[in-house]
């Protein structure tokens, strides 16, 4: 009995130790890291795209990082040095998506891409060489069936899957149907070369990509490997294959949509050349894209990588793909059998093109005759966004541009003004964060508020939601001012340009001031008197500079001397000044400024405190009146803005006067016009709400 109790106690003790070991945090600091390139294949039909999104976790990248964290291959995304070769859209699949990332390694003796830990035990460093961790096997055991790792390659520490990719190849599968595939093949060749594809992509996205010239290395239309007979078989499958250096958002699907219109002989092949001629056609005509599910990221080419395949995993991936293929092939065969049976009974097989989004119109209108998207007009080329990281030297670059005569709108300066006492943002900040964020003079203590938000993501998000709308409105007023002064471009100095993304859609150029992480930390510690831990927390709270550099189309390297930075700034300024794109926009801007300026002036007038300055009334159709009282803050009275029907316009001497001394009146119709005669006029006081909108001169003013 005692022996049994002792055994039971020993088992409980062992189970307790196992549970404690299972819950013990994994110590990444004693393990090496290895920078690798990892190749993935996935079926994207049931996912919302590849890249992680804020509004859903049903993305390929979200599932991938779940697997990486679960298997302890990475500690977190922020420290993983992660880059993707490309981001596929919702419903798009990939056979060769490549990412670069730092993974946990067991190579204590070093190797290509291996980073040894500083505090690793000395005994570990004397270990003999062992095979690397089976990354593909580890991931495939936890990834969903529709996502598979194919192989991996060691890479140098500076390798980036995004920036070191030599070319990307996409394939779009489609049936012959009623399409003239020979005409499509001829038209596809027109895509080759370097062109401006702004009319063949989706432009209205705030993703920081603002240059639309892309180089297409090859484009072709050819039959797919199919068991179906060739000839005029409408069910024969074809492939549109396109290879390029990089692609714009929805570019391949827009290019395929135009090819489908050409294949149906609704457009001539010349339409491609006309759409790429942005001088003659600067605005994108409205048309539907091709559907998403036939599109595949087929290949990403890199130089200098040595891919390592795990043989048993190749069989595992083949078995998984065969399972998917079996299900899809059987379903396709069932459907094809039904089609053959109906056609054998004399039914004419339809040859419709079903790969364009939306419904087909009965009366086709040529692309160049369709309405154009107003957002396609490059109204943004006056605006240049300048950003960087904390202590990266953005202020230095901004000062250099200002010395060159460039107009600078500093978001930090604007941010200070919008939170001054008695402003809307000021009251909201005090309401949400309390009076403890105020100084003795009533102003906001920016240093104390900064300490609160840098350590709390939710509070930082709340503060941004309060201040950013007010900052954007104030910046808009300054932008209009500089536009009217005739400046070629305006620089928006915005620290969180890519984090908020609200302004990027209005920018034609984005500039990032970059410095290496060690220099950034040292500058921050010296500037603000912070400890290294505090400085690292400040830096970690912002988007990494490497990621910002990838989003920008101009980079100022500020790790060296001031003279070197000044040379780069001068070169950038010369390039922007030499741009002639602004000429067309100048005419559009001047035409639009009058209405925008009027709105801003009305808002400014309402903010002066004259509540009865502007009064709007709704009169019968065709008779809207704006009554304006002379403001006490204005040096002279302002005349009323009145729009009436010409039939009711009264001469000034015929206008009756209000019974209240000093008040003036005008005539407005009191009922709808009747046939054969105009409305009976009745006078009203225009002074303001004290008289009321329905007060007449007969009744007087209260």
Image (spheres, rainbow, N blue to C red):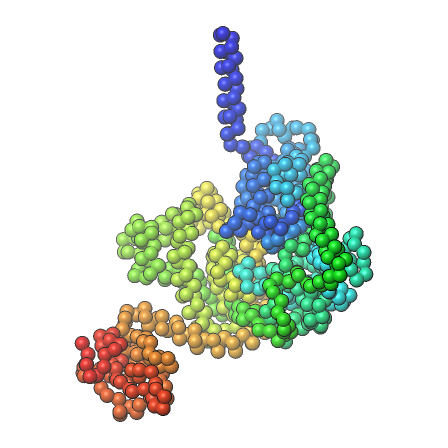
Q: Is residue 441 visible?
A: yes
Q: Residue at x 27, y 56 (%)?
A: 441
Percent x, y of residue 701: 19, 79
- Looking at the image, residue 113 lies above or below residue 562: above
Q: Residue at x 66, y 64 (%)?
A: 257
- Looking at the image, residue 542 lies above or below residue 251: above
Foreground residue among 506 and 201? 201
Left or right: where does residue 629 sit relative to residue 273? left
Foreground residue among 636 and 488? 636
Quadrant of the image occupied by residue 244: bottom right
Q: Residue at x 40, y 66 (%)?
A: 474
Percent x, y of residue 281: 62, 74
Percent x, y of residue 325: 71, 45
Quadrant of the image occupied by residue 197: bottom right
Foreground residue among 39 and 103? 39
Q: Is residue 218 visible?
A: no
Report the residue that reaches farthest toward the front.
345
Percent x, y of residue 132: 67, 35
Image quadrant where one finds the C terminus: bottom left
Numbered label tally: 0
Q: Residue at x 76, y 64 (%)?
A: 181
Quadrant of the image occupied by residue 653: bottom left
């Amino acid at each position: 009995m005692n022996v049994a109790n002792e055994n039971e106690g020993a088992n409980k003790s062992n189970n307790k130790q196992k549970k404690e070991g299972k819950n013990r945090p994994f110590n990444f600091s004693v393990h090496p890291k290895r920078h690798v390139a990892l190749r993935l294949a996935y079926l994207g039909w049931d996912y919302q795209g590849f890249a992680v999104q804020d509004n859903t976790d049903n993305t390929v990248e979200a599932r991938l990082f779940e697997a990486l964290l679960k298997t302890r291959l990475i500690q977190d995304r922020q420290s993983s040095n992660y880059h993707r070769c490309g981001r596929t859209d919702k419903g798009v699949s990939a056979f060769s998506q490549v990412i670069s990332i730092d993974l946990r390694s067991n190579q204590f003796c070093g190797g290509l891409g291996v980073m040894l830990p500083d505090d690793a035990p000395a005994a570990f460093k004397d270990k003999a060489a062992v095979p690397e961790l089976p990354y593909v096997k580890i991931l495939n055991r936890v990834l969903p069936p529709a996502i598979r790792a194919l192989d991996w390659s060691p890479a140098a520490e500076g390798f980036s899957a995004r920036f070191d990719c030599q070319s990307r190849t996409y394939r779009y599968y489609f049936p012959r149907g009623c399409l003239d595939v020979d005409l499509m093949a001829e038209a596809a060749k027109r895509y080759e070369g370097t062109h401006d594809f702004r009319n063949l992509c989706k432009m209205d996205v705030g993703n920081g990509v603002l240059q639309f010239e892309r180089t297409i290395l090859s484009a072709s239309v050819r039959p797919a490997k199919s068991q179906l007979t060739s000839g005029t078989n409408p069910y024969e499958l074809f492939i549109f294959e396109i290879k390029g250096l990089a692609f714009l958002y929805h570019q391949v699907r827009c290019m395929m949509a135009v090819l489908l219109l050409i294949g149906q002989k609704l457009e001539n092949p010349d339409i491609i050349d006309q759409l790429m001629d942005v001088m003659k056609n600067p605005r994108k005509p409205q048309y539907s894209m091709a559907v998403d599910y036939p599109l595949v990221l087929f290949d990403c080419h890199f130089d200098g990588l040595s891919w390592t395949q795990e043989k048993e995993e190749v069989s595992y991936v083949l078995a998984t793909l065969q399972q998917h293929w079996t299900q899809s092939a059987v379903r396709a065969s069932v459907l094809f059998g039904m089609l053959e049976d109906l056609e054998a009974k004399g039914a004419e097989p339809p040859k419709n093109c079903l790969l364009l989004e939306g419904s087909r119109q009965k009366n086709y209108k040529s692309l160049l005759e369709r309405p154009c998207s107003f957002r396609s007009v490059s109204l943004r080329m006056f605006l240049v966004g300048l950003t960087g990281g904390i202590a990266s030297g953005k202020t230095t670059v901004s000062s250099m541009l200002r010395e060159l005569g460039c107009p600078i709108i500093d978001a930090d300066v604007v941010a200070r003004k919008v939170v001054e006492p008695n402003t809307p943002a000021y009251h909201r900040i005090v309401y949400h964060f309390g009076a403890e964020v105020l100084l003795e003079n009533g102003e906001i203590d920016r240093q104390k508020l900064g300490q609160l938000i840098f350590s709390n993501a939710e509070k930082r998000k709340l503060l941004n939601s309060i201040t950013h709308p007010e900052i954007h409105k104030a910046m808009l007023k300054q932008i209009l001012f500089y536009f009217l002064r005739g400046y070629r471009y305006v620089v928006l100095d915005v620290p969180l340009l890519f984090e908020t993304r609200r302004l990027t859609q209005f920018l034609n150029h984005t500039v990032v001031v970059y410095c290496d992480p060690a220099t950034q930390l040292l500058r921050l510690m010296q500037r603000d008197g912070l400890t290294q831990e505090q400085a690292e927390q400040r830096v970690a709270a912002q988007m990494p500079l490497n990621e910002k550099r990838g989003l920008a189309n101009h980079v100022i390297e500020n790790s060296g001397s001031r003279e070197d930075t000044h040379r780069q700034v001068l070169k950038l300024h010369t390039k922007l000044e030499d741009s002639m794109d602004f000429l067309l926009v100048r005419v559009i801007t001047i035409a639009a400024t009058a209405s925008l300026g009027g709105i801003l002036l009305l808002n400014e007038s309402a903010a002066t405190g004259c509540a009865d300055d502007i009064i709007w009334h709704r009169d019968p159709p065709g008779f809207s009146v704006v009554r304006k009282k002379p403001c006490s803050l204005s040096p002279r009275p302002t005349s009323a803005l009145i729009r009436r029907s010409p039939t009711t316009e009264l001469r000034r001497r015929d206008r009756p006067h209000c019974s209240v001394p000093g008040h003036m009146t005008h005539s407005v119709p009191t009922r709808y016009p009747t046939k054969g005669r105009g409305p009976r006029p009745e006078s009203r006081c225009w002074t303001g709400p004290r008289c009321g909108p329905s007060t007449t001169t007969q009744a007087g003013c209260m």
